[in-house]
Image (cartoon, rainbow, N blue to C red):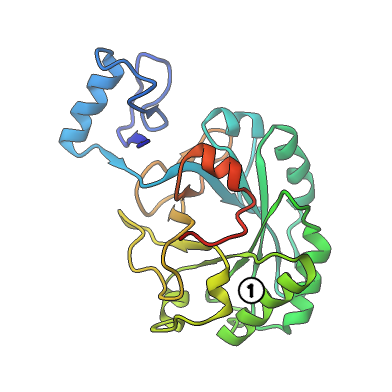
Amino acid sequence: MTNFWCSFPFGCRHGCPLSQARLTRTNCNPDSFLYRHHRRLISLGGIMAVQGFNGVVDISHYNSVSSFSTVKSDGIVAVIHKATEGATYQDSQYTSRRTAAKSAGLLWGSYHFATSSAVQSQLDNYLGYADPSADELICIDYESSSSGTMSLDQLEDFVTGIHQKLGRYPVVYGGSLLRENLQGVTSTVLSSCPLWFSRYSSQPSDIPSAWSDWTLWQYTDGSSGPEPHAVNGIGNCDRDTFNGTAAELQAQWPLTSPAS
């Protein structure tokens, strides 16, 4: 089911700004104003069809959250929050937001921002602080870091350590650095992990060669990339789509197997 999102900054007669209005062929009458207006904007290039189910956000203490109930009401079903970074950093908002989001009925996940610190120290920091339950997504965020960038060998050691401790592989998040470091590589333990690909373009193309397909796609950081950029209750933020339907996301969460 394709969701069409309007990038025009004005409202519709249904009481919601079109920048936040979601339209599907199954929930909008083809004779209605909203449907006809969206079809007109599509012809003018005002709407971009974002591939996948657009119901995931990833945030950290840098993002303000007024209400997770409001976030859920805006069509979001899953929140992935920064838990830790490197060997010692812990996000101060993680624990309270975890409780609030799950109380609001949202799926929950955490991520660890990788650095070049000793892998075991990073594993201890992440697993000790995030303390993930079996129904929560776990993720390693692999990108350049001013504190020192994790090597590919360290990344493989990290996901192996997660698997040894929890009996499941984490999601691997990455963009250009991950693609460049895995150029031509097809045999790696990383292939056992779901791919969360960061690419701010119209399609999640040129994924790293270790994967046959993506599971999550971060299509915007809240300013670059296709719209929508904002979520009610948060504002502009990192937004992500799932390579499947809403029902499949609910059924497959916490995403322990790569897309095939």
Q: How many marks?
A: 1
Question: Is 96 placed left or right of 200 in the picture?
Answer: right
Q: Is residue 67 visible?
A: no
Q: Is residue 168 visible?
A: yes
Frontmost residue, 63 versus 242: 242
- Give the quadrant of residue 64: top right
**x 58%, y 78%: residue:** 189
**x 45%, y 46%: residue:** 244
Frontmost residue, 208 versus 97: 208
- Give the quadrant of residue 3: top left
Question: Amino acid type of disc 1?
Answer: Ala
The C terminus is located in which quarter? bottom left
Residue extending furthest toward the right:
128
Q: Secondary structure at mark 1?
A: loop
Question: Is 82 placed left or right of 196 in the picture?
Answer: right
Q: Which residue is mark 1?
A: 114
Dot 1, how many residues are within 10 Å of its Cα: few (below 14), some (14-19), or many (20+)? many
**x 58%, y 81%: residue:** 149
Q: Residue 98's x, y, as percent?
A: 74, 45
Question: Is 214 placed left or right of 90 in the picture?
Answer: left
Q: Residue 30's x, y, as percent?
A: 26, 17
Q: Residue 253's x, y, as percent?
A: 62, 48
The N terminus is located in which quarter? top left
- Please determine whether, in this image, residue 142 is positioned above or below residue 26: below
- Please determine whether, in this image, residue 101 is positioned above or below residue 205: above
**x 53%, y 62%: residue:** 258
- Please determine whether, in this image, residue 151 is positioned above or below residue 57: below
